[in-house]
Amino acid sequence: MSKPQTFDTIVIGAGIIGSGCAYKIAKSGQKTLLLEQFSLGHAHGSSHGASRIIRCTHGEPHILPFALDAFKEWEELEKIDRNAGKALIIKNGVLTIDCDWKRTLEKSDILRSFNVPHEILYGGSIIQRRFPQFVNFDKNYSAIYEPGGGALLANNCLEAVQRQFQALGSLATLKDNEKVLSIVPIPQKENGFSLLEVATNKGACYYANNVVVATGGWLPNLLPNIPVLPHRVGVCFWKVLSRPELFKPENGTAPSFVIIEENGQIFYSLPCIDYPNAIKLALHGWDLPITNMDEHVFGDKTKISDWTGISQYISKHFPDLDSSSPMIKCACVYNLTEDENFIVDRHPQIPNLFIAGGFSGTGFKHALTIGKIISNWINGKNVDFDMEKFKIDRKTNVLMKARI
């Protein structure tokens, strides 16, 4: 009988959050196993695709320390991984347009309190003068332009994190196409903590002093009592028909953007990063809950909910785009909590079982920061962030959702 494989920490899920956790934990000196049920880089969850927005212009001050740290972490990783020759972050700026001037001023106050450089553009005509691709926004609209924001090159980021994890040698083991079936605590008399047994579909049992579950939409499968619900989300790419220079991130005229409308709809967009002649422009929203992730994995990911509303919006505000239909349609997964704040916490009954999930469509940029936080917990170090709003048992108020 082969000797059981034992690790200091096992991380389950090699999407961006799990990979970020594994990298930071192994880098701290912990012998770490990273397990992934699919092939690396798969398109079944929330970590695939070429681009994600990274910015500090959020509506809640408790997010700002995470966002600021995210910039530092990705810039540092880009330097560490420079031999790969792939950029991880583009500073093409972020424009946040809002129909409510009060929200714009509130966000500006938050940015000023954290010394984040930005400027306010008052009225649709001023927005269009600065960025000509935005038309027919009336005088009631205002915007914050954050020049230091931009886009993460998401596929590059995930590959870089996994590459640097594996570069840690004997501290880092990565196994893909191996699905975790169970996590079982085994009480230890010496310290009262439980050694954790992780069983997989390969018939293997691994043991660790700590386990981190970062399985995205599959979190309810392993830990059904954690309040996270996966939802299918449609993403659309729209062909650029005219003035292509206004949509190229390298030109300084094509910010990533978020638009908050009176009816509560939130549109978001990234310039021509995923495709050379199309921008990503979609609704920050979701379809019905996914009750069976296998159906999502094996289903048609080009079949998304009605996109005609986005088409009409583009026709009104972005005449340089082909609004007749999306050039590309695809689906990903949002993993939602009730208040849309994420969950980063210890399991309430098993203190050496850590959970990172429920990022509600805004988690990618925070992966390295989350990894650092959980690594510090595992190593008994202090955490420089207020984690109260991210506890499993927090009191939620759905009227005070984390604003995008």
Image: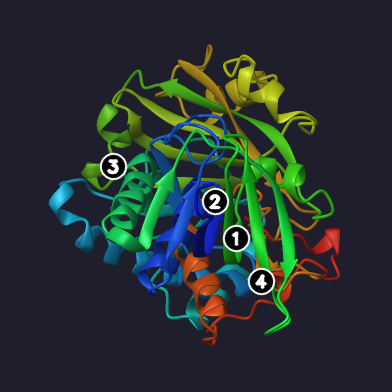
Q: Tag 3: Cα neighbours inside 10 Å, few (<14), some, or many (≥20)?
A: many
Q: Is residue 288 above or below residue 211?
A: above
> Could you tell whether 55 is left or right of 204 in the image?
left
Name the residue: 83% across, 69% down.
Answer: 393
CA distance separating discs 3 and 2: 18 Å
Residue at mark 1: 212
Residue at mark 4: 352
CA distance separating discs 3 and 4: 43 Å
Residue at mark 2: 97
Q: Earlier in the sequence, mark 3 or mark 4?
A: 3
Q: Amino acid at mark 4?
A: Asn
Dividing the picture into quarters, in which one does residue 311 lie?
top right
Q: Of circles 2 and 1, which is in front?
A: 1
Name the residue: 62% across, 35% down.
Answer: 201
Secondary-structure class at tag 1: strand
Q: Earlier in the sequence, mark 2 or mark 4?
A: 2
Secondary-structure class at tag 2: strand
Name the residue: 45% across, 61% down.
Answer: 32
Secondary-structure class at tag 3: helix
Q: Earlier in the sequence, mark 1 or mark 4?
A: 1
Q: Tag 2: Cα neighbours inside 10 Å, few (<14), some, or many (≥20)?
A: many
Q: Amino acid at mark 2?
A: Ile
Q: Is residue 324 visible?
A: yes
Q: Position of residue 174 (x, y in %)?
A: 41, 48
The residue nearer to you, when weighing 312 against 8, is: 8
Q: Of circles 3 and 1, which is in front?
A: 1
Determine whether label 1 and label 4 are within 8 Å by CB.
no
